[in-house]
């Protein structure tokens, strides 16, 4: 009787290369995401990168980038969340300007503080009558509430420097205390700065004061209403992301 041939089904199936291929693709994706993320240094991003790399290299496939639950609108490594229902994929993280506007509105101070943007960051504009009497640089007692609110904004952006600017109209002033609008505008800026530092105990290294007198008007000084607009104090919170972008373009 002839012997039956042994079943050779216990050998390789020919699909084992898929495991190696998937691991290689995962590592390549991790590598390129690492390069992209490191283009702007961020401590949170770095920690997330390290965690992802550790998961991949330790063989924990369930935590790898390819298996990340993107259906919930969450993106690995980048560190920002996107609403899955947003057809444009808008980033949820708010800008400094949006946060400041929200804070001012919630504090019910929008009638006293105008929030603007410029090339340096976020500008908080206060009309003269909010802080001072005409021709004076002493802070009115009733204005401390708005300065305290602004101090709360500084605490939210503790790494940003602050510039306090004093501005006047073009009506000449000359008295024993303020020989010109230069002195008046500078004294106002310094007094606001000193309130933040001396009363609210903020870091003096963050602050700069400047007085521009009548020479940076926002409107023409051709009416009482326009002159009132030019008499103001600007408080600029420097936006670090703008400074970083400037550095990258140099």
Image: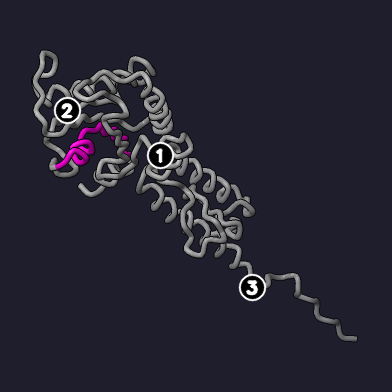
Report crowding for label 2: few under 14, some 14 to 19, many 20 or more residues within 10 A (C-alpha).
Answer: many
Residue numbers of the magenta segment: 223-239
Label located before the other in sequence (1 or 2): 1
Label located before the other in sequence (1 or 3): 3
Mark 1 and mark 3: span between their CA atoms?
A: 61 Å
57, above or below 4, in the image: above
Judged from the image, the secondary structure of the residue bearing numbered disc 2 is strand
Which residue matches tag 1?
A: 100
- Please report contact status of discs 1 and 3: CB closer than 8 Å, yes or no: no
Which residue matches tag 2?
A: 211
Judged from the image, the secondary structure of the residue bearing numbered disc 1 is helix
Residue drawn at point x = 60 percent, y = 60 percent:
71
Mark 3 and mark 2: span between their CA atoms?
A: 78 Å
Label located before the other in sequence (3 or 2): 3
Q: Quadrant of residue 201?
A: top left
The one nearer the camera, 187 or 55, is 187
**Residue 123, percent from left and from top:** 30, 38
| Residue furthest front as drawn | 224
For the N terminus, the image quarter is: bottom right
- Residue 14 is labelled as 3
Report crowding for label 1: few under 14, some 14 to 19, many 20 or more residues within 10 A (C-alpha).
Answer: many
**Residue 183, percent from left and from top:** 13, 22
């Amino acid at each position: 009787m002839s012997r039956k041939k042994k079943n050779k089904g216990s050998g390789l199936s020919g699909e084992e290369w898929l495991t190696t291929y998937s691991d290689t693709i995962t590592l390549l994706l991790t590598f390129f995401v690492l390069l992209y993320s490191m283009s702007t240094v961020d401590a949170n991003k770095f920690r997330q990168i390290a965690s992802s790399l550790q998961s991949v290299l330790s063989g924990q496939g369930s935590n790898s980038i390819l298996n990340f639950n993107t259906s919930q609108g969450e993106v690995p490594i980048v560190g920002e969340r996107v609403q899955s229902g947003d057809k444009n994929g808008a980033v949820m993280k708010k800008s400094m300007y949006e946060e400041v506007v929200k804070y001012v509105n919630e504090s019910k101070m929008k009638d006293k503080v105008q929030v603007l943007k410029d090339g340096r960051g976020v500008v908080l504009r206060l009309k003269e009558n909010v802080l001072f009497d005409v021709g004076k640089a002493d802070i009115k007692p009733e204005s401390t509430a708005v300065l305290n609110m602004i101090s709360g904004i500084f605490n939210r952006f503790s790494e940003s420097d602050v510039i306090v600017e004093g501005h006047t109209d073009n009506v000449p002033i000359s008295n024993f205390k303020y020989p010109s609008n230069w002195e008046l505008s500078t004294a106002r800026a310094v007094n606001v700065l000193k309130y933040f530092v001396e009363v609210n105990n903020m870091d003096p290294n963050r602050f700069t004061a400047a007085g521009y007198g009548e020479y940076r008007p926002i409107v023409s000084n051709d009416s009482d209403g326009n002159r009132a607009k030019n008499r103001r104090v600007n408080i600029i919170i420097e936006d670090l992301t703008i400074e970083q972008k400037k550095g990258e373009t140099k």
